[in-house]
Structures are given as C-alpha cells and as structure tokens.
Image (cartoon, rainbow, N blue to C red):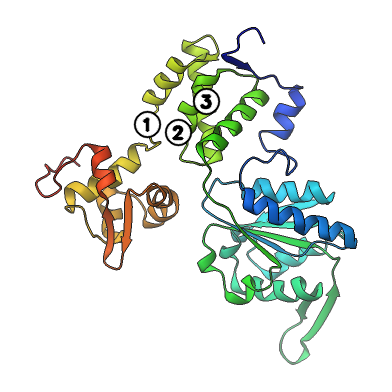
Amino acid sequence: MADKDITKLEATSDEEIYDCGLRPKTLQEYVGQHHAKKNLQVFLDAAKKRKESIEHILLYGPPGLGKTTLANVIANETGSGIRTTSGPAIERPGDLAAILTNLKDGDILFIDEIHRLNRLVEEVLYPAMEDYALDLVVGKGPSARTLRLDLPKFALVGATTRMSLMSAPMRDRFGLILPLEFYEDDEISSIIARSAKILNVAIDKKALPILSSRSRKTPRIANRILRRVRDYAEVHGGGRISTDIALGALEDLDVDALGLDRTDRKILLALAQKFSGGPVGINTLAAATAEEPETIEEVYEPFLLQIGFLERTPRGRKITVSALRHLGIKNVENQPKLL
C-alpha cells in the first residue's frame, strides 16, 4: 500500500461482493462474541469427532448482533445445507410439515424470531426436535387418525430477541443456548475494515474509530453507516473515506459522538423535558414520542440501557445523570417544553 494511513481494501471478485455480501463464512472470520464462539467451537468439534449431527442451538440477543450470520457459519462449519425461515412465516402446522419433510440428514433449519411461532406450530415442533418425527392428524371427527412421519436428523437453530417470550418447553429442547452481547469498539472497527475490503472502499485508518464509536456496538448498524459514508465519500471525497469525510457524513446523518440518532435523543429529551426525568410508563413515553412501545423496547432501549442513559424501574423509565450530561441538561425540573 502506498500510504500507511490508508487501508486499501480490495474485493477478490464481483461475485464475492454480490453473492456473499458482508457476512463471514467461518468462525475464524467471525469477529467478536468470543465466549459464544469458544463454546460453539467445542460443541461443533465434539459432534464431528463423534460423527453425529449437532444438537439444536438457540441464539438470543438484541437485533443486529449476528444471529443470522452465526447460523450460516454453523452450516458452513458442519458442511450442512441450511433452510431459513421465520416464526411469523410459519402460520400453520402444515407449513412446518412442508419444510421439515424437505430437509435432508444433517441439514440445519434456521428459524428467526422463533418466539413468534404459533403455539399450534410449536406443539408440532416438539416431537420433531426430540424424536425426529412428525405427528399429523388426518381427517376430522370420529374418522380422524394420527399419522407419524419419520424425519431426517436435522438441527434446529433458533434466533430470538425476546427469549422471555419463549415457552419453557421450547427453551428446554435446545442443547446449546448462546447469548450474543454488544461488541467492543475495536471489534466494530475490525468489522468495518473487513466490510470496506469487500466493498472495495479506501478508508483512512483514523476514520475507523470514528465510525465504530457511532455504530451502537452493533455490526448491522456499523455496516449500514459504512455504506452511507461511502455514498457521501463518492460525492464529496472522491470515494475515499477520510476523517473529515466521516465526520461530515455522520453530521448529515444526525448521528452524534456516542451513536445516538434523532429518535434516541427524542426519547431522552421527552423523559427530561416532559416528565422531569421520569419515571414514566412505556405506553405514556411511546405516546409522547409518537413511537410504538415495542419499537422503543426492542430497538432503542437495549443500547440506551447498555450505555447507562436509561433506567428501568418498577414505576417506569428514568433518564440517568450521564444522559442529562450528554444532552447538556443540568436541571430537569425547570426544562422548557421543547418537544
């Protein structure tokens, strides 16, 4: 490389860019989640030595931390085929039966948002997970009979952002449960550098920590920011992402130094200015910010809690002193109603 301050990151081929995307294929390429990777590696190696199919695996954690990516990595590491679906997409037991009967020995069935499975579908899934059999009821009334179909020995990989919403019988049928955690800034920097290589983007090494610090410790957000900064660089910087280009793009995107966007600040300002810092119930907070309660709970709260800007109490949500300091607010009692 001609310039040591520039990481020129080249993709090997157009096929790699468009067909493979930004997802890593192996555990070695997978950045971060060291605890989960360590346990998973032992789990996979043991199954290989015994020449057995792997047991069912449950991945849980906030959105964007790599659950879908890790499911595909598991398939690649075991040399298995993978069939991907989601909990809401499987509406009836017949839908699940169609998927299961088309699997082969050793295949992986990945169900995203598994906590949203229909309870009738979940009941059909129990014998499939335990006995590799599908129990179907044929006919109605007095002539109805039960039909059991043998299934190939597949492995179910489930992913959920809300493990508390899963039933206990479902959780107990997984042989390995792996929590995914928020990433460190240096791990996010490595992910951005790898993604920039695949996207064939020239990026200043000094720009990496700027992007990583504003990525909310989440790879999905880091890659999204990288794409938008790349667009900005194409227009204003000749395609190269320098520190000035990165800062300019993030300012236009309205992402501050800690990764908070306009909605994050709207939630925090509502707590500070409308409710004197809280506590306030989630439904009231949602109404005050024109956001859905589920959106606040699943999209915005995890990060605000992680960085210590929000507290959950029995009486509701409260803003913290750190958040007030970040927003430049000294006294929540006499704040003007700006929102």
Residue 199: which quarter of the image?
Answer: top right
The label shown at residue 257 is 1
Disc nearer the start of the sequence (2/1): 2
Disc 3 versus disc 2: distance between alpha carbons? 9 Å
The label shown at residue 4 is none
Badge 2 marks a residue whose secondary structure is helix
Residue 157: which quarter of the image?
Answer: bottom right
> Of residues 9 and 85, which is closer to you in this image?
9
Disc 1 versus disc 3: distance between alpha carbons? 13 Å
Q: Position of residue 92 (x, y in %)?
A: 66, 68
Residue 58: which quarter of the image?
Answer: bottom right
Residue type beneath disc 3: Leu
Are the residues at dot 2 and dot 1 in contact (C-beta closer than 8 Å)?
Answer: yes
Q: Position of residue 257 (x, y in %)?
A: 37, 31
> Of residues 109 and 10, which is closer to you in this image?
10
Work out whether residue 103 can be spotted: no
Pointer 3 local density, CA inside 10 Å: few below 14, some 14–19, many at least 20: many
* Residue assigned mark 2: 213
Badge 1 marks a residue whose secondary structure is loop
Position of residue 148 relative to residue 39, above or below, is: below
Q: Identify the residue shown where x is 24% and y is 40%.
A: 325
Give the farthest residue toward the top.
2
Q: Position of residue 102 (x, y in %)?
A: 83, 59
Q: Identify the residue shown where x is 78% and y is 50%.
A: 75
Q: Quadrant of the N terminus?
A: top right
Disc nearer the start of the sequence (1/3): 3
Residue type beneath disc 1: Ala
Residue type beneath disc 2: Ser
Residue 333 placement, left or right of 251: left
Work out whether residue 97 can be spotted: yes
* Residue assigned mark 3: 208
